[in-house]
């Protein structure tokens, strides 16, 4: 692979969009603020606690034989996901944090917090932006739920910490997502 400075990215800005579970990947994104039908912007997220793509699981194990000490390596069980903090205390963020489905919405606009949270399954599109360049990361099935306690700070945003686990989707033959190469001015 050759050195190519035009394919580097500093994600100084980004957007998180949600859709119904198994919402198809946008056919063509030319504007990170308009990914197409079926996607709703989650809103403001924390700049101090930027989204983090996670990887949890085991390491591969090397198996050997008497004749070859490194004959084969096992495939590890890995779970990928994302954590981010919403700074909008709106209906969507609160439902995700508390694991409250649509029936939790009350007529006065409040959300009834369930005794047993239920992760909300959504499609997620994360778009990393660097000037006129951007990278879309699409995951058709993500299990979303509150990730940690809410910490109040008189001098900072009220943040709702959320965690998503990428799930397999029949939409893409059991895979968990697709990431595009750099798009925008450099593509």
Image (cartoon, rainbow, N blue to C red):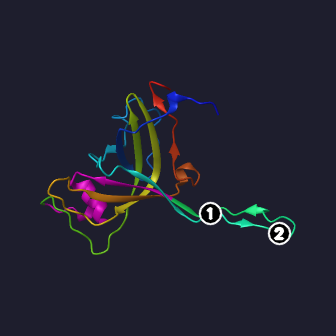
Secondary structure of the residue carrying tag 1 is: loop
| Residue position marked by numbered label 1 in the rendering | 76
Q: Are marks 1 and 2 in contact (CB under 8 Å)?
A: no
Q: Is residue 104 left or right of residue 56?
A: left
* Image location (x, y in percent) of residue 142: 43, 56
The quadrant the N terminus occupies is top right
Where in the figure is residue 23, as x and y percent of width and height?
Answer: 43, 47
Q: Nearer the viewer, residue 98 or 87?
A: 87
Q: Report the front residue among 152 and 94.
A: 152
Which of the numbered marks, if any, corresponds to residue 65? 2
Q: Is residue 9 left or right of 62 when viewed as pictured?
A: left
Instruction: Give residue 137's position: percent from left, percent from top.
Output: 46, 44
85 part of magenta stretch: yes
The answer to whether residue 5 is above or below residue 16 is above
Q: Secondary structure at mark 2?
A: loop
Q: Quadrant of residue 98?
A: bottom left
Q: Residue at x 27, y 60 (%)?
A: 95
- Residue situated furthest bottom in the rendering: 115
Look at the image and give the residue range highlighted in magenta.
80-107
Label 1 or label 2, whichever lies nearer to me, is 2
The spot of residue 151 in percent (x, y) is 23, 63
Q: Is residue 100 visible?
A: no
In this rendering, is residue 124 above or below 10? below
Nearest the viewer among 17 and 49 is: 49
Q: How many badges with numbers are in the image?
A: 2
Q: Going 44% across and 24% down the picture, which residue do you hit?
A: 185
């Amino acid at each position: 692979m050759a050195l190519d400075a035009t394919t580097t990215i500093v994600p100084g800005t980004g957007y998180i969009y949600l859709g119904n579970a198994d919402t198809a990947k946008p056919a063509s994104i030319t504007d990170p603020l308009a990914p197409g039908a079926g996607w709703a912007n989650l809103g403001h997220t924390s700049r101090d606690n930027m989204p983090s793509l996670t990887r949890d699981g085991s390491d591969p194990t090397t198996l050997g034989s008497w004749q070859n000490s490194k004959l084969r390596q096992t495939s590890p069980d890995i779970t990928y996901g994302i954590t981010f903090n919403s700074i909008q205390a709106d209906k969507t963020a609160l439902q995700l944090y508390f694991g409250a489905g649509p029936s939790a919405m009350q007529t006065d606009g409040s959300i009834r917090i369930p005794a047993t949270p239920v992760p909300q399954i959504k499609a997620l599109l994360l778009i990393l932006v660097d000037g006129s360049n951007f990278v879309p990361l699409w995951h058709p099935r993500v299990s979303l739920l509150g990730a940690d306690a809410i910490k109040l700070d008189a001098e900072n945003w009220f943040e709702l910490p959320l965690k998503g686990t990428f799930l397999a989707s029949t939409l893409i033959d059991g895979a968990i997502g697709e990431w595009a190469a750099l798009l925008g001015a450099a593509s």
